[in-house]
Each structure stands twice: as C-alpha cells, then as structure tokens.
Amino acid sequence: MLLVIVAILAGIALPAYTKYISETSISVVNSNYKNAVKAVKAEQFRLMRLRERLGDRFKYRSPDYFFGRADNWIPHIIDPNGRKAPGGGPAFIVDKGGTQTGAIGVEVGTGGMGTAYVNLYRPAYAPSGQNDGFTWEMSRITPSGDIIVRH
C-alpha cells in the first residue's frame, strides 16, 4: 500500500517539478534579456548626452573599436557580473543567441564617431527541448536610445 502511495505521489510530483524547473529557466532568460535591454538603453542615452556635450571632440574620446565590438559591450556594460545561462555557460555571447543554453546573443554595429547600435537576441529556449510557444526576439537599440523589436 505504501509503495502505491509513493508511486502515485512520484507520478504527480515529478512532472510538476520538471515544469517548475522549465518555467524558472525561461524566467532567467527573460530577466537577463530585459536587464540587457535596460543596460544598453541607459548606455546609449549616456553616450548621446556625451556626444551632444562634446560635439566633434567626442570621436577622439570614444574610439569606434570599443563601441563597435560586442565583446566590449558584454563585460563592461551588459553583464559586468558574469552571470550564467540556465543551461550552462555565459548568459551573453557574441552571436545570435544560444538556443541550447539560453544565452542571450549580442551583436554590435557602428555608425562612426562613437555611435553604435546593439542587437540583443533572446533565444527560443526551453530546457525540456520543446519550444512550448516560446519564441525568439531581437531588440535593436539605436544610438538615440530607440528600441526596435522583432519577433
């Protein structure tokens, strides 16, 4: 009798636990994505104000090799604490995102004189391997701080 009760509880608890882990992992990906959008938008706003104040002198204080490279934006602006993706590895990668790990993809393009747009890719990540309606999303944050979202 005790074995039957344990089997029934296990049959109910295991799927519930698996769903809980999946939802938690997806929440981590969404949170990382939203925090990255906020950080990039804040940095773009700061740079826009600096460009307005310094004018032509700005290009000498902000070389494009910094602003035009995602591997500079990730550790300095987007993720200075080095967070981890729910599936393992870094939370942010220089690419279009990691659907296997839940890593947010970061691409940067430059328009010259210290202006850069940043593309952030939220992957269609689900730990169970099934998409469950979770879609990818890309946000482009422009030098003026505008956000263009694509699904």
Image (spheres, grey):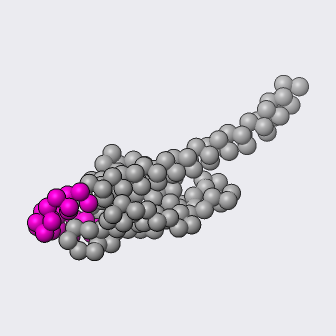
Asked if residue 105 can be seen in this view, the reply is no
Residue drawn at 36 percent across, 56 percent down = 41
- Considering every residue shown, the one lying at the far top of the view is 2
- Measured as percent of width and height from the top left, residue 43 is found at 30, 55
76 vs 62, left or right, is right
For the N terminus, the quadrant is: top right
Read off the magenta span: 48-69
Viewer-proximal residue among 48 and 69 = 48
- Measured as percent of width and height from the top left, residue 140 is found at 42, 66
Q: Splitting the image into 4 quarters, where does residue 51 fall?
A: bottom left
Q: Is residue 14 magenta?
A: no
Q: Splitting the image into 4 quarters, where does residue 24 fall?
A: top right
Residue drawn at 65 percent across, 41 percent down = 20
For the C terminus, the quadrant is: bottom right
Residue drawn at 84 percent across, 25 percent down = 2
- Measured as percent of width and height from the top left, residue 115 is found at 26, 68
Q: How many marks?
A: 0
- Measured as percent of width and height from the top left, residue 25 is found at 56, 47
Asked if residue 145 can be seen in this view, the reply is yes
Q: Splitting the image into 4 quarters, where does residue 17 fall?
A: top right
Residue drawn at 83 percent across, 34 percent down = 8
Q: Main secondary structure of the magenta part?
A: helix
- Considering every residue shown, the one lying at the far bottom of the view is 111
Q: Is residue 58 magenta?
A: yes
Please say if 26 is above or below 72: above
